[in-house]
Image (spheres, helix red, strand yellow):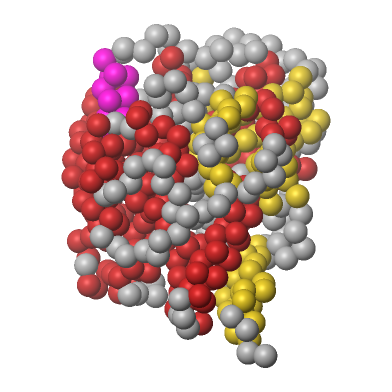
Amino acid sequence: MTATCISVDHVARVEGHGDIRVVIENGEVTTCEMAVVEPARLFESMVVGRSFEEVPYIASRVCGICSASHVVTDIRAIEAVFGVAVTDRTEALRELLVYGSYLQNHATHLFVFAAPDFLGHKSVFPLADTNPDLLERALGLKALGNELCTLVGGRSIHPITAVVGGFTHEIEAAEYRRLAEAMDASRAFALASVDLFRDFDTIALETAGDMLAMVAPGAYPVCTSDTACFVRAGYEFAAAAVEEEIEEYPQGSSAAFLARARRTGAPYMTAALARVNASWDALCKDARYAAAKAGLRPPEYNPFANNIAQAVELVDVLDRCAALCRRLADDEFSGTSAPVPFAARAGVGTGFTEAPRGALFHRLELDGDGRVRRASILTPTAQNIANLEADMRQLAEKMVGEGYDGALIRLEIEKLVRAYDPCLSCSVH
């Protein structure tokens, strides 16, 4: 019997700690695991008994990159319980806050984590020597995301100005206009990034799983809809029904729960690629053109294409943020961003947003004083792991069948894991 064991302890260039184990015996893949090895962080238990006012700030600590998304998601869950309807201006500011984390995350993932795979480097540091301008401009895009989060949310991570019903602070019109100009100035680099990742060679692969994303008629929503869609299966469901539609389950090899669609039993991917598949027609013109030029058109089910989808979203986000900032500066949104009045009451509410890495759900049960009785958080990476494992197996089987050696199989599996842009720390929230 001939056997090959591919083991990667602590996969490099991802958020958090995870191990890969693939065993190939007599030309057959017998084991394929993506094991999350971090201990449980217990955020769902941590917030029990806490006042609703504290919960968003605690929940934001689940992730330093996606903290804005956790805050907005938690606030939306609380508002669903209290029956709070916010103004259009508040909705616009929340979009800006979430988009700031997109710029932070996508720029980091694409150029610090993913690009070295395709440029023959083991880390980003050689890139600083071989193409310092590329890295500098990428980090500049991340810095723009940091600035957007700081000006809208009060700080670059763990925002403090977003509260139930609105915002406690808002910048002046001149600052919005300056941000809009900065977005415009970054667009050329974002467009070039799509071309860069288009030219990288990837293995032809089609995930067998589904894709999940937020949807809304005529929109590319990230925090303004309560409707989720399984793209391949072709059905939608309300965020409030998330526990009836998505099943979390344990697997012995991983500290994180895995997820699957209850109706079909299928694993699924939630990420930029899922959003592009679900809402292609609503991408901004420049982003849609860049995607088409790069060969990214729905249906696209190669998980490696998530890198290109993130680059396309950079173009889309810059266009949207520039427009939002100018409209905010010109006072085109109804209402103010000051918190609207509300009263605490008992009930269950679900918050839903598209974090940079995919769909994020927070479900809260509050008592009459607004204290948490029960909390449930469903992060993008926890939803992705089952589908990632299935894709890893499919990739390994394809490469074994085509005669690739173990070293190349290992490299491509690591590239696939990074293409998913996992946050393994989030998965054990």
* Image point (76%, 19%), residue name: 347
Could you tell me which quadrant the N terminus lies in?
Answer: bottom right
Location of residue 188 in the rendering, given as x and y in whole percent from the top left corner: 18, 45
72 or 12, which is in the foreground? 12
Q: Which residues are magenta?
A: 319-330
- Tell me, yes or no, whether the highlighted magenta stretch contains residue 321: yes
Location of residue 91 in the rendering, given as x and y in whole percent from the top left corner: 46, 21
* Image point (57%, 76%), residue name: 8
* Image point (26%, 49%), residue name: 294
Location of residue 116 in the rendering, given as x and y in whole percent from the top left corner: 35, 68
Number of callouts: 0
* Image point (55%, 52%), residue name: 208
Quadrant location of residue 164?
top right
Q: Is residue 176 left or right of residue 220?
A: left
Q: Is residue 146 above or below residue 179?
A: below
132 or 362, which is in the foreground? 362
Location of residue 412 in the rendering, given as x and y in whole percent from the top left corner: 45, 70
Residue 296 visible from this viewpoint: yes
Q: Is residue 419 left or right of residue 139?
A: right
Residue 356 visible from this viewpoint: no
Q: Main secondary structure of the magenta part?
A: helix
The residue positioned farthest toward the bottom in the image shown: 1
Q: Is residue 117 left or right of residue 25?
A: left
Q: Is residue 372 above or below residue 44?
A: above
Quadrant location of residue 179?
top left
- Tell me, yes or no, whether the highlighted magenta stretch contains residue 371: no
